[in-house]
Each structure stands twice: as structure tokens, then as C-alpha cells.
Amino acid sequence: MLNENTRLAGSSLCDVLVIGGGPAGSTIAALLAERGRNVVLLEKATHPRFHIGESLLPLNLPLFERLGVREEIERIGMIKYGVEFVSPWHGDPVTLNFANAWDKAFPYAYQVRRSDFDHILFKNAVAKGATALEGHKVTGVTFHAGAGATVTAVDEAAQTRQFQTQFVVDASGRDTFLANQFGIKQRDKKHNSAALFGHFSGATRLAGKAEGHISIFWFDHGWFWFIPLSDGATSVGAVCWPYYLKSRKTEPAQFLLDTIALCPALTERLKGAQLISPVTATGNYSYTANRASGRNYLLLGDAFAFIDPVFSSGVFLAMNSAFIGADTVETCLDQPRQAARALKTFDAVLRRGPKAFSWFIYRATTPTLRDLFLRPSNFFRLEAAILSLLAGDIFRSTPLKLRLFVFKAVYYFNNLINLKQSLTAWKKRKHAIRNPETVALTGPEI
Ligand SMILES: Cc1cc2nc3c(=O)[nH]c(=O)nc-3n(C[C@H](O)[C@H](O)[C@H](O)COP(=O)(O)OP(=O)(O)OC[C@H]3O[C@@H](n4cnc5c(N)ncnc54)[C@H](O)[C@@H]3O)c2cc1C
């Protein structure tokens, strides 16, 4: 660790430089600063700023607790006890409640405005002692042959600043700063979709305790999210196959409204509701970097991998990677002989999350998986196991492996007995994902 004389106040030296003050970056900055590291956190925007990704998972809560922000998040959050699935090809909607998961200790999560949520995490990093600079966009990282790196950033006044650091953490989200610099970002060939979204006032919510449930509505070209927020607004987004978004001939806001009109059940919930925000879109969004670490750097959260948001896993995986990352950085700085092993473990753990969810993501729009979700059965505690996965309980020792294996076997068996339907769905999906072009409608990646 650097001593007091070399702290940032008078110079630009630090132990760890974190690129990006989203959930992953602010979390690792807080954890390392709390342990006495000299941490610089550079964020190109200024909080509070808009970000998509508003529905959190129950297993986020222990992370908030450990960061000391649980009460603050509780104040801005809408409690979500479960997930409602609505399908035009089935009967009544089905709700899965987190209280029925394997471990009953995590019965709910929150839905949040990301501008407020990310601001809380960023301020927490400052409170724990990180030097956090907003309006600082990292433009280059040079790794030195001996040790450490020089990070170059440009501030809002277009001034260039340089920072010498022992360790670099890339938490730049979908900007994937280091993965781009190294040319190691790989598009997920098995998945390709794009989203457009906005906020509405006056949407009809479910009643009572179910008011904060996230609802997933399937329709012909993909699926919608319906996320009630605590201030009365509701986030609605359409996640579609690229061919559908490319068919757009109107402004994004009109296109979102026209797309909603294709889903009668969602239209009903939005009767009389008003669109109260600009409509934004993001496209072509599943990827993984082919490594998550190197001798003196780590990639966290979306800077490493991004998966389809159908199971609301992004923020949890990002924050969880920061917790594992903090221990890994400590080992690299304090016990260089253990570094290679720690980095290897980090890499393996980071891959586990996207892998656990991806099997379900690739199949989420197939009739067979929809059937299984819409006719849940707790035979062999399969429903409990699926709920635990949906809660984010994938990094602990909860015994899900066998149940998830059986669930997958049931899925394949059902595919076999409905072979014609499954083959048609498989062909449709193959056709739908084949266009890799980005489908950006407005603005930058968010
Ligand atoms: C359409 C859509 C819907 C989603 N829905 C959900 C959901 O419901 N639930 C969920 O959990 N997740 C959801 N996600 C995923 C979620 O948004 C991300 O997984 C999560 O934000 C990742 O956190 P992060 O800290 O890795 O990256 P980010 O939150 O993106 O933070 C990265 C930060 O780095 C900054 N930055 C970037 N480049 C630089 C640079 N060069 N210099 C300095 N700063 C930089 C950015 O400004 C940003 O603040 C969704 C994503 C999309 C696209």
C-alpha cells in the first residue's frame, strides 16, 4: 500500500484505480477504501444520472448490508416479492414468490430508480475514503512491464490528467473499456436482442403485496418488462429480436407505444397511462470478454460480460463481482506469490453467474420453457430451486445443482414429446438471432 506522503492529495499516485462509478465500480471502491487502500474512482458522468436496470434480486440485500447501505436503499426502493409471468398462449398469469425459494431467508428484493441507487453507492465509496472524481472519462491505460499502470483521463474542462496506479479495475459497464483496448470482447453467438424502454405514470399495478412485483409479458417478437417504482412511475421496456426493431418507421416513442399495442395484456395495464420520459434503446447486447483479469487488472460486471436482462441479474452480478474482486485485488497487492491463483479463481467465479442464467435466457422465449414457468410444479422441489436461481442464490452452497439438472431434463423431455413445436421454435429463434448488427435508435449506450 502507498504511504501517506504519496496519497492523491498532492500527487496522482494510488493503489487501485477504478474506471466507472456504477454498481460494480462504487462497490469495489468502497470495499478497498474501507480496508485502507488508496483508491481513485473515475466516473465519466455526474451522479445522479439515468441508467437502465431497475429490478434487483433478493441476494442483493446481503451485499447492501455488508456495504452499510441497506437502509438507504430501502428508503428509495419498491419492495418486490415476486415475478409475474403473463403469456398470450396460456391461461391466467402465474406468479412465483421468492418466499417459496429453497432458502426462505430472502423473500424480497427492491426495484429502484438507478439514478438514486447508483448515487447512494457512489457516495458510499466517498464516505469509505475513496477519491471519487466525476466528469472524468478514462481515455487510455498503459500497463508497465515492471509493475503498475498509467491511466489517462479527460475531465469536463477538457484537461488531461494522469494517474499512476498499482492496480486497475475496469468497471466501465457496457463501454467495456479494457476489453475494447485488448480486443477481447466476444459477441454471444447464441443470443442477440435489443431493447427500447421508457417510464409511465398511471399504470395499473397488481393489488396489495403484489404491487411491486415485476411482470414479464411475452409477445410475438420477444418480451416486455413492467417494473413498478416507489415514486409511482413504472418502467416499461420491450426486449425484441433485432429484425423487429429494424422494422421501425416511426419515432422511438411512437414505436414503443405501437409495440405495446401488440400485447393486449400489457395494453390493459397501461390504459390511461402517460409516457413521462424519453424513450431510449440499446441493441446487440450479449457479450463476454475472453478473460476477466490479468497481472494487475480486473474486469467487473458489464465490463466483463453482459447477458439478457430477463432475469434482472445484471446489478447483482456486477456487485457480486466487486466483492470477489476486492479480495482478489488485496491478494495481488499483499501476496504477489498467490496472485496467479487468486486471479484464476476470480475468472472462474465471474463466469459462473452468466453461465447459470444463460441456459434459461437462451430458452426463455421457447414454448417449452414458457410452459414450465406457467405451469409451475414443486415436484422434487423444482419450483424452489428455480426460485432460488431467480433470486440470485448461485454463489452459495444451496443445493440447487441436482434440481436444476432435473428441471433441464424435464425441459428436454417435454421438447421431445412436442418435437414439431420445438423444432419450429428452434428454427424461428435461429433466424431471429442471426443478425448481429447493433440496433441503436437514440443516444449512447446506457
Ligand atoms: C435494457 C436493459 C435492461 C436491464 N434491466 C436490468 C434489471 O432489471 N435488473 C438488473 O439487475 N440489471 C438490468 N440490466 C443490466 C444492468 O443495467 C447492468 O448489468 C448493471 O448496470 C451493471 O453494472 P456495472 O457497474 O457493471 O456497469 P454500469 O452500471 O453500466 O456502470 C458503468 C459506469 O462506468 C462509467 N464509465 C463508462 N466508461 C467510462 C470511462 N471511460 N471513464 C469513466 N467512467 C466510465 C459509466 O458512466 C457508468 O456510470 C439491464 C440492462 C439493459 C441494457
Image (cartoon, grey):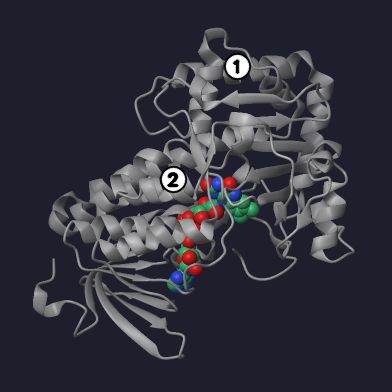
> Would you say residue 44 is visible in this rendering?
yes
Find residue 409 and name its label: 1
Q: Quadrant of residue 63?
A: top left
Judge by depth and name the residue closer to the eye, 141 or 337: 141
Secondary structure of the residue carrying tag 2 is helix
- Residue 58 position within the rendered picture, expressed as x and y whole percent measured from the top left: 46, 35
- Residue 328 position within the rendered picture, expressed as x and y whole percent measured from the top left: 26, 51
Q: Of the two numbered discs 1 and 2 on the same chain, state the one appearing first in sequence.
A: 2
Residue type of the residue flagged with mark 2:
Glu
Question: Residue at coordinates 23% horizontally, 61% vertically from top-left?
Answer: 33
Question: Residue at coordinates 67% horizontally, 71% vertically from top-left?
Answer: 443
State whether residue 387 is above or below residue 271: above
Secondary structure of the residue carrying tag 1 is helix
Question: Residue at coordinates 80% horizontally, 62% vertically from top-left?
Answer: 253
Which quarter of the rendering shows the C terminus?
Answer: bottom right
State whether residue 281 is above or below residue 382: below
Is 176 positioned to the left or the right of 242 in the image?
left
The reply to whether the C-beta atoms of the residues labelled 1 and 2 are less than 8 Å apart is no
Question: Residue at coordinates 42% horizontally, 22% vertically from top-left?
Answer: 104
Find residue 308 and name its label: none
State whether residue 250 is above or below residue 190: below
Find residue 74 and name its label: 2
